[in-house]
Image (tube, rainbow, N blue to C red):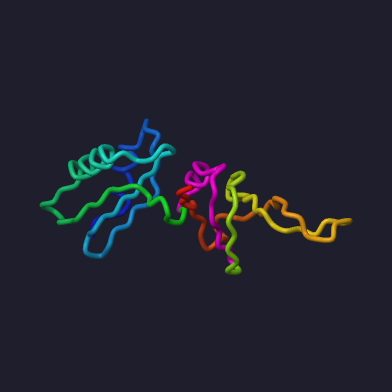
Amino acid sequence: MIDKNVVKKLVDEWLQDKEYFLVSIEISPDDKIVVEIDHADGVWIEDCVALSRFIEDHLNRDEEDYELEVGSAGLGQPFKVPQQYVNFIGKEVEVLDADGKKVKGILNSVDGNDFSVSVEEKVKVEGKKRPVKQDVLHTYQMDKVKYTKYVISFK
């Protein structure tokens, strides 16, 4: 089986001095290698091809046969690394917290492992008969939520 650390080292070498970042590397028992990269402005197919060729040039198919797939992190897929959170500040996201509660709101900030989402909620205000819609800030920890993902909107 191909060593994940070898592939990671090759990907890191290719990413050096580029604005891309590594999202994930998965290697199945039958040596199918899946590499996901991302970029703040999206991923170009030419760059996926270049990374794929770079990896292929440095792995020996005579020693071990493998299948290689290089692509971008899916737009509607859950975030896997902190840099994805940073890239979507100011955009609408959906969060499924550890308790199974789902909220949609604007990703407000990211600080280390913590991130906050501004959610419009009805809040009871003193002196008012009916609840008023207000933005409420919810803070989460990346490693404590089930997922966070970008909300695709066609408005």
Identify the residue at horizontal 22%, vertical 52% (top origin): 68
- Is 31 in the magenta? no
Looking at the image, the residue that sits furthest to the left is 62
Identify the residue at horizontal 60%, vertical 55% (top origin): 141
Q: Position of residue 5 (x, y in %)?
A: 32, 51
Query: Quadrant where the N terminus lies?
Result: bottom left
Residue 110 versus residue 130 in the image, above or below: above
Q: Residue 10: which quarter of the image?
A: top left
- Is 82 in the magenta? yes
- In this rendering, the count of numbered labels is 0
Identify the residue at horizontal 89%, vertical 56% (top origin): 127
Q: Is residue 85 left or right of residue 122?
A: left
Out of 89 and 153, give the one closest to the viewer. 153
Q: Position of residue 94 (x, y in %)?
A: 54, 56
Q: Which residues are magenta?
A: 80-98
Out of 26 and 131, give the one closest to the viewer. 131
Out of 41 and 57, give the one closest to the viewer. 41
